[in-house]
Image (cartoon, helix red, strand yellow):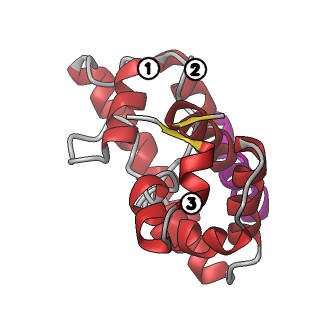
Amino acid sequence: MSISLWQLNTLSKEMFVGQIGGVFEHSPWVAEKAWEARPFHSVNELHEAMLAVVRHAPEERVTELFRAHPDLATRMTMTSYSSAEQQGAGLHELSPDEFKRFAQLNAAYTSQFGFPFIMAVRGRTKADLLAAMQQRLQHSAVQERRQALLEIQRITQLRLIDLIDE
């Protein structure tokens, strides 16, 4: 279901959040705060307003946003956004050995950084994701927080483009 940018700009805060509150994984607070910056003249302007909310949020709130993301290749219930994105990368068709490897890397990553591995998976393969997980386990905590924010930026931009007609 898509909505026009014009329609989105006219919605009450509650309806606005109802339309785009899920773009940032389980974090409707981003849309709630971004609503105050209306009207938006482009999807990019809306996206920048939402990113600004995240950038100005306390570190603990950003960590909560990180932790709201599902593990890659999990068998747990995910949002419709995450489920479709992970299916597109083939993560719903893992062999038992591949599933075990993803589970091991997810556990190592979460143990090291305190939140799940986050990556924009659209257009990526299982091999791409495994390689990225192995490489990013070499990052410092500061590097990885920065990378996680970049990945969230990519994920949410694609979601907004899919959802909103300019």
Instruction: Residue 154: give x, y in percent of width and height.
Output: 67, 39
Instruction: Residue 94: give x, y in percent of width and height.
Output: 28, 19
Q: Tell me if mark 2 has few (under 14), some (14-19) or many (20+) residues whose alpha carbon lies within 10 angstroms of its own.
A: few
Label 2 or label 3, whichever lies nearer to me, is: 3
Indicate left or right for 92 with 70 as reference: left
Quadrant assignment, res 164: top right
Contact (CB < 8 A) between labels 1 and 2?
yes
Report the magenta residues as a range. Answer: 135-150
Q: Earlier in the sequence, mark 1 or mark 2?
A: 1
Q: Nearer the viewer, residue 156 or 86?
A: 156
- What amino acid type is highlighted by mark number 1? Ala
Is residue 24 visible to the viewer in this orientation of the structure? Answer: yes
Mark number displayed over residue 75? none
At a point 28% along the width and 22% down the height, the residue shown is: 97
Vertical comparison of 63 with 166: above or below: below
Residue at the disc numbered 2:
128
Residue at the disc numbered 3:
10
Magenta stretch secondary structure, dominant: helix
